[in-house]
Amino acid sequence: MPDYPSRAERIMQRIHELAVISEEADGVTRTFGTPAFLQGRALVQGWCEAAGLSTRLDGIGNLRARLVSANPLAKTFVLASHIDTVVNAGKFDGPLGVLMGLDLLEQLLAKQAPLPFHVELIAFSDEEGVRFHTTYLGSTVVAGSFDHGWLTREDAGGISLARALETMEADTTRLADDAIPANDWLGYFEMHIEQGPVLWEREIPVALVTAIAGQMRVELTFTGMAGHAGTVPMNMRQDALCAAAEFVLITEQFALSHGQGLVATVGKLSLRQSASNVIPGEVTCSLDLRSPDAAQLAEAYAVLQAYIEALATQRHVALAWNLVQQTAPAACDPGLNETLAEAIADAGHEVVALVSGAGHDAVPISAVAPVTMMFIRCYKGISHNPLENVEPADLAAAIEVADRFLARLAVVIARRNDEAILPLSATNPEM
Ligand code: HGY
Ligand code: MN
Ligand code: MN
């Protein structure tokens, strides 16, 4: 019987070892292409190679490790998540899925069981979009949907994505070759903390994901008139910060009034110049708008934009509204989800199906391959916060479900290929 607690313990050790690497003195921050990101990626690459996997770094900085099937006609099944983080992040968002995938590959290598499909482990280089404000840079390359126009995007220091990749010695001339061809895909499985409270409250270790919310990311710049705080009468001001402040509260009320599904967040706000005795002349802020329902998202976006443009006009403040990123809601594959549900039930857990409000690399991949995701229970659902945590017992349960899922999938695919059905997992005698 596999020793799930020991496997969980080793994953936890690696999570904590990786979390020590950060571009900040305190907290976990490893954003795309920074020395801390590169150091963290090298650590994970070393674990992959110590496991006996050949690895490579692709043209966008993804770490890729592949376990090849003896069947030359086999398709590729991808286990993946991201290794970049937000600022002052938790330890688990992203790395947990990569390190659980590595654990599964280590078990497959140890069993030496022939596989009816190739397995590729991918640690995506940029899912959060913190540095260049556009998400899924790593997974869009693998999906073949990378927009080369993004290479000119600049970070806060004026460094372009192309330049950042150069310093990473990434070869951007072959990004098209880094995509997995559409007909090579068997499917995609991402394991990720829930980042929500449902599993924590219900004390259930895992859930399957039915859909992932679509998102629109906007950058807004309010431009008024800087002025003397002591001499400009209140009714003659073009105060950019008051306009932005009204935008923030109107956005909150708008999302609250929309009820289920729609969420809106203003996570960044900065004044171009700030002094206590100067009326703010220019303010830039972000808007993150999401819904699992494409029509609701489109309608809310249009209504809110019109509302905020009218607010700016009324305040005699100019508004630049720049849609930086939009991704449609993505559906997970019913067939893979059925196999995952069976694995969850096999392991003795209630099958919970959730919609993900958070974006994931499964979104761009879902355009070219069937995807499924497994959520792992996390402390009070907290994420994007150093308090992010996973209980070892929940991780051990999740690893068992993942084992069972792969074993079931291997049987399904071997039958489909009319191959000999060999047991992949000791946990399932009938496998
Ligand atoms: O923003 C998100 O949903 C994810 O954490 N990138
Ligand atoms: Mn994530
Ligand atoms: Mn995240």
Image (cartoon, grey):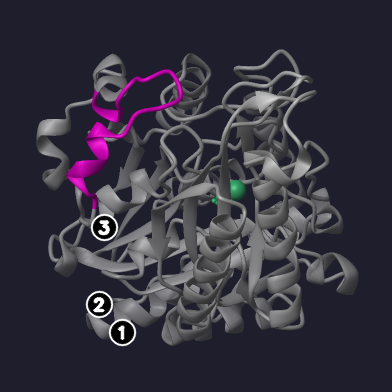
Task: Identify the magenta region.
Answer: 146-162
- Decide: is 362 above or below 15: below
Q: Is mark 1 within 8 Å of ligand 2?
A: no
- Report which residue position mark 3 lands on: 143
Q: Which residue is mark 2?
A: 419
Which quadrant would residue 283 be assigned to in this image?
top right
- Local crowd size for mark 2, using a 10 Å CA cut-off: few (<14), some (14–19), many (≥20): few
Q: Which quadrant of the figure contains the N terminus?
A: bottom right
Q: Is residue 114 visible?
A: no
Residue 306: image location, x then y, percent: 50, 70
Q: Position of residue 46 (x, y in %)?
A: 45, 23
Within 8 Å of ligand 2, the CB of disc 2?
no
Front residue of this view, candidates 75 and 129: 129
Q: CA distance from mark 3 to mark 1?
A: 27 Å
Please give the name of the residue rendered at 36% of the width and 70% of the height, measured from the top-left corner.
366
Marks 2 and 3, the one that precedes in the sequence: 3
Q: What type is the residue that disc 1 sits on?
A: Arg
Q: Considering only order in the chain, which callout, 1 or 3, is on the residue closer to the N terminus? A: 3
Residue 219 x %, y %: 48, 47
Is 251 contained in the magenta span? no
Q: Which residue is mark 1?
A: 415
Q: Is disc 2 in contact with disc 3, using a CB cutoff of under 8 Å?
A: no
Q: Say which of marks 2 and 3 sits in front.
A: 3
Q: Is mark 3 within 8 Å of ligand 1?
A: no
**Residue drawn where x is 76% and y is 61% of the image:** 377
Instruction: Please state which amino acid type lies under the numbered disc 2.
Output: Glu
Cα distance in 3D space between marks 1 and 2: 6 Å
